[in-house]
Every structure is written in structure tokens, then in C-alpha cells.
Image (cartoon, rainbow, N blue to C red):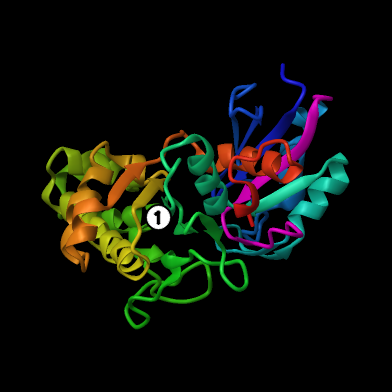
Amino acid sequence: MDKDVVLAVDIGGSKVACVLIDPSGNLLSDISTALVPFDRNGIADVNAILEILAPFTRNPMIRAIGISLCGNVDVTSGEAILVPNLHWKHVPVGKLVSEMYQLPVFAATDVRQALIAELIWGKAQKSNYVAWGTIGTGFGGYLFLDGKLYSGFHGFAGNFGHNTIDEVNGYQCGCGKRGCVETFVAGPAIARSGQIVLDKGESPALMKKAIDGKITTRMVFEADSENDPRSKEIINDVIRRVCISLSGLVNILDLELIVLGGGVVKGSPEFVSRISKTIRPYLMTEEAKRDLRIEVESFDNSALIGAGADAFERLGLINFLGANFK
């Protein structure tokens, strides 16, 4: 095993993933996953999450722990400022992990980490104007502009999933606002739309798939692939809303590449190609319509791989982009 090893950790809205990784991006262990533990108030139990990491920290070659979190994170301190799906506000995750395991800890938002993985080892290599987008439990992204990571004034750039599109008739979002685009396109939104269709008796296909009267996101995708009309309407509406959101980024920033990841993206083999086709009419310039590339993520979990890459970069053990990593 390489002498330089980091523990990469991805704390998502529903799962915690862990893996050991080397400076070339090679996985040195199987990816281990566990469900995020929540307390009786529906808040993710940070101490229980820390315990999940324990078996992996026994390797004496580990130089640091890299963490991706599904929310706004202070890159310097590792504090989780706002993680809506875990119902965290101002949780000092980096400090807590470092104190518990006596290792350097580098934490950042999952979308930043995923983009780093793509820039160093994935499909965004040699690209200078890139957006990463995750569509899963939530919807958001990160930006790489003019050859530099772009984090914004407070470090929270890329929260396009929390742009409000219907605060009157929309749904409550985990961020505290109502009507965010995330509440219409993320996995829970697809399941909710499928449940409404089922409850109205409008889809025989979903009736057959329902378990104890409940519909999941996967069931809607399966029914869509079987040409169930109402399920197809749901997925088409999700794609339309995603395209409107992403086209706004392209029209403002003149991007060359968007890399998409997350559970919803993997719900259908054609999902990304359907987005790539549907987005074109929403783009302003003929150049963007011609040149924009939309790709599916290079890894099964880009945020997890990127957490390792970020740790190596901040340790100074890899320097693929040098001073551009700010």
C-alpha cells in the first residue's frame, strides 16, 4: 500500500460513504456505506456519524481525513454552516473529527469535492469553464471559471438548487425557504409527484410497483422507462426544470462543460442525454447550443473521490492545479 493514504468520507443526505485512497486516485479499500443516523428530532447525529469512521482510522498510514458534506461548509474551519438535509446549522464537523481521531481534517461542500475529482482525474481535465451539478437528495453545484475554483464572496457559490421558482404554490425546502427549484427536481420531489399520481389512481404501472401504498423515485423512473404516461410526464417536467436552471448558468457564465452526478442522474441511462438535448432551446447563443457538453460523472461517487483529492491537495502531496485551488 502507498505510504501516503487519506480517508475520504462523503456525508450525504441519507448515507455516509468511506474509502481509503492514494494520491493517484486509486481506491485502497472497498467503499463502505452506512445510513446517516438521525435522532428523534430528525437531526443527523454527528457523534454517531463520527463513530462510523472509527474502523477506517486504524490504518497507521493515513495522513488526513477528507470530508464532503451536502451543504454550505467553511473550507478553512470545516464548520458545517448550513446542511439542510441533515438539519445542521453551525456544526463544527472538521474540529470534532480532528479532535476525535487526531488527524488533519479537510472538509468542504460535496459539490466542490466532486468537481475537484472531475478536474483532476475525470471528464473535466483540461477544461476551464465547468459547472458540476448534483441531482440527488438535493440539487446544487460548484463552479470552475477561467481555470480557477469559484466559491463566491462567502464561499457558498453554486446553490442554484435554492433559486426560488414558486414561493406561493411551491413546497417547503430544507433550507427554510419555500418553492426552491430543488423541491421540484430532487429525488424526494420525484417520489412525491409519483405518490400524488398513485393516490389519484392515474397510473396502473405505479399501482403495480407500489409497496404498502408507497412510491419511490426509482419506481417512477422504472415506470417512465416502460412508457407509463403519467410517470413520463413527471420525469419530463423534472428534466425541463433542470434545463431551465442550468441554461441560466450557461447564459450568464458561458460554460463549456457541465458534469452531472447524483442518484437522480443515475435513475435512467438516458437522463443526461435527455438533458443535453432539452437544454439547447433554452440557451441564448448559437455557440453555446453547438459547443456545450453535458456529461455524467466519471465516478460512482465523485464527491467521495474528490474528498480524498482535496485532502491530498491541501496537504501539498498533489499539485495538479497548483495555486488555482483556492
Whether residue 212 can be seen here = no
- Give the quadrant of the N terminus: top right
Q: Residue 252, image x and y in percent?
A: 35, 70
Residue that carries the numbered disc 1 in the rendered image:
188
- The one of 218 and 91 positioned closer to us in this rendering: 91
| Near-viewer residue (135 or 45) | 135
In the rendered image, which quarter contains the C terminus? bottom right
Above-or-below relation of 165 to 311: below
User: Which quarter of the picture shows residue 43?
Assistant: bottom right
Q: Residue furthest top?
A: 1
Say which residue appears at 35% left-offset and 51% top-offset: 257
- Taking depth in this image into account, of 324 and 8 the one nearest to the observer is 324
| Residue 289: quadrant of the picture | bottom left
At x 70% / y 52%, what residue is drawn? 45
Residue at x-position 58% and y-position 59%: 71
Residues packed near mark 1 inside 10 Å, few (<14), some (14 to 19) or many (20 plus) = some
Q: Is residue 32 left or right of residue 222?
A: right
Kind of residue at badge 1: Pro
User: With respect to residue 69, does 318 lie above or below?
Assistant: above
State the residue at coordinates (56%, 69%). Answer: 152
- Magenta segment: 59-78
Coordinates of residue 276 in the picture (x, y in percent): 23, 50
Q: Secondary structure at mark 1?
A: helix
On the picture, is 80 further left or further right than 157?
right
x and y percent of residue 82 in the render? Answer: 62, 66
Query: Farthest residue in the bottom direction?
Result: 168
Q: Considering only vertical position in the picture, is 89 above or below 128? A: below
Asked if residue 103 is positioned above or below residue 240 in the image, the reply reads above
Q: Is residue 99 magenta?
A: no
The question of residue 62 being in magenta is answered with: yes
